[in-house]
């Protein structure tokens, strides 16, 4: 890992580090993480589209 990246490594631990949720099966945690990320991307694109149309 590059030195600059290793210095910044502790800044952000992620919402679901290791794609896991402590009380969930690891496979389901991975799927939940993927769905959450996809939903956030879709929501962001939708909101940006709404803002773009208002202009």
Image (cartoon, rainbow, N blue to C red):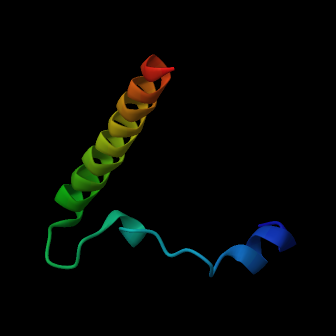
Residue 32 x %, y %: 22, 54
Give the residue displayed 44% in from the left and 18% down from the top. 53
**Above or below, 15 relative to 52:** below
**Above or below, 23 relative to 26:** below
Q: How many marks?
A: 0
Residue 40 x %, y %: 35, 45
Residue at far right of view: 3
Residue 29 x %, y %: 23, 61
**Above or below, 52 relative to 27:** above
**Above or below, 25 relative to 45:** below
Which one is in front, 55 or 9? 55
Quarter location, residue 51: top left
Which one is in front, 18 or 12? 12
Give the residue displayed 21% in from the left and 57% down from the top. 27
Residue at far front of view: 55
Quarter location, residue 47: top left
Which one is in front, 51 or 26? 51
Give the residue displayed 23% in from the left and 65% down from the top. 26
Residue 17 x %, y %: 41, 71
Q: Is residue 15 left or right of residue 4?
A: left
Give the residue displayed 29% in from the left and 68% down from the top. 20
Which one is in front, 22 or 55? 55
Q: Is residue 39 left or right of residue 53?
A: left
Looking at the rendered image, the quarter that the N terminus falls into is bottom right
């Amino acid at each position: 890992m590059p030195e600059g990246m290793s210095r910044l490594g502790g800044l952000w631990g992620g919402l679901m580090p290791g794609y896991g949720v402590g009380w969930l099966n690891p496979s389901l945690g991975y799927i939940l993480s993927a769905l959450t990320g996809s939903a956030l991307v879709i929501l962001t694109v939708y909101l940006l589209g709404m803002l773009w149309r208002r202009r």
